[in-house]
Each structure stands twice: as structure tokens, then as C-alpha cells.
Amino acid sequence: MAIENNLAIFPSLKGKTVFITGGGSGIGEAIVGAFAEQGARVAFVDIAREASLALCDRIAAAGHEKPVFRQCDIRDIPALQAVMRTLAQELGDFDVLVNNAGNDDRHRVEDVTPAYWDQRIAINLRPMFFTAQAVLDGMKKRGGGSIINLGSTSWHMAGGGYPVYTTAKAAVSGLTRGLARDLGPFNIRVNTVTPGWVMTERQITLWLDEEGEKLIDKSQCLPGRVQPSHVARMILFLASADSAMCTAQEFIVDGGWV
């Protein structure tokens, strides 16, 4: 878990309290590890218990402060906010909120029912508002904070095959900008980080094939593949004091695809 050579250390993140949704694997795992490496006090929720506990152990074994994990289904807003209140009492009010959790389950327009629509929104959009609501009072007391919402390039490129997902992810940008205006007077910054096609284990297993490799090579301006760590580094910047006047913006990490 050591910080890579020549990458930035952000002194302003040391000792900060950070809450992350969906931190147990994929991009979330990289985010949890990146903040721990910076000396932040990290708490996260995920539905995957074993993977999350193993991540906490790996980070502690690397010599960093062990993150605090709580199993939680983010679709249950009262439970999610209750967990956040408890964690804030244990660790202190949160300085940083990262709304990472999401699910890009594929689906056809013809197959979407009202129940499925509500379930997808309940995973990919609704928790972002209510986690922001939950950290608001604490950030006010601390004199400010940073909220970072994870978007998706899927809707930028008019991607097909998951219309409810693209709807939710497009709405993230609206949520970010609206919250940035309302929370700005309290020195709370709100931004979107939008990953491209990130090479997580899930993406490689479920979606990446030879045609996908060719599409990436054709579409990205940069060679190589976007990794979870690339997304995490942008999030660190936006959480730190180095980005003090950045708010209401979308920062795309996709190798120059869109």
C-alpha cells in the first residue's frame, strides 16, 4: 500500500476524517487505500463484508491507520445515516465525503419496471443526497469540507444498454452543482469525479473482451488503461486544501475518451 514514487503527498489530508461509500472493492478500494496512505482517518461502508475486512487488514499490515468498516446496504437510507452518525461520534465529524458506491447492471428499455427503476436510482443516485445531508452539520461545525460524487462517462458518450444507470449518473452532475451553490457559503465544496472505463476486476470479468480492448485503443487519447488508482488520485486532490477554490465542477478521468 506504499505511495508510488513521485506522486504527491497532501499534508492537508493528514488526520482528516473521511467517509466513503462502496469502499470494499474496485475504485472504492483504491480510494480507501489512497486516503489511508495520506494519514487520513478513513471510515467506509459496503455490502461485501469479507472483502472489506480483508482490505482493512491489508492497510493496517502496511503500517497505516486501520480503516473503520461497517456493513451497510446504501439503499436503506435510515440505516446508512445511522451508521454515519455513529462513525462521526467515534472518529469526529467528517471533513471529506466520497460518494463512490454504484452499480452498472445492464438492462434493456423493454425490461425496466417501476420497481427496477426505483432500485437502480436507490443505488446510483439517492444515497448521494442523503449522505451529503448527513455530513452537513458536522462540516458546518468544522468550518468546511469536501464532498466528491462519482459520475460516469456513460451518459457523455450516449452509451446504450443501461438507460436507468445513465440517467442516474447524468443526474449526479446536477446534484453536485445544486449542492455546491447551497453549501458554498459554509465553505463546503462539492465536485464530481467522472471515471472512464476503469480496469476493475468486475469490469475485466464481466465486460472487457477483445472488441472492448480495441474500442479503448481507438477512443482514448492516451495509451494504456485507466486504473482505479488514477481515479483515487484525482479524488485526493479534490479532498485536499490544494483544490480550495474548486467547486461545482466535473473532473473526468478517462484517458481523453469524451
Image: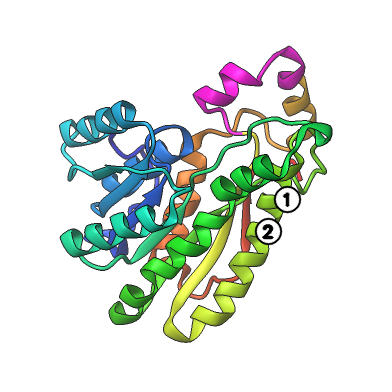
What's the residue at 23%, 52% (across, down)? 39
- Position of residue 121 in the picture relative to residue 113 (left or right): left
Vertical side of 27 occupied by 249: above or below: below
Q: Which residue is mark 2?
A: 171
Residue 255, given in percent of the width and then of the height, sits at: 66, 40
SS for callout 1: helix
Residue 236 position by quadrant: bottom left
Residue 48 appears at what percent x and percent y?
37, 31
Provide the secondary structure element on which disc 2 rests. Answer: helix
Furthest-bottom residue in this view: 185
Q: Amino acid at mark 1?
A: Thr
Q: Is residue 209 magenta?
A: yes
Q: Residue at x 46, y 38 (%)?
A: 229
Q: Which mark is residue 87?
A: none
Q: Quadrant of the N terminus?
A: top left
Q: Residue at x 69, y 14 (%)?
A: 209
Question: In this picture, which residue range is highlighted in magenta?
Answer: 198-213
**Residue at image mark 1:** 167
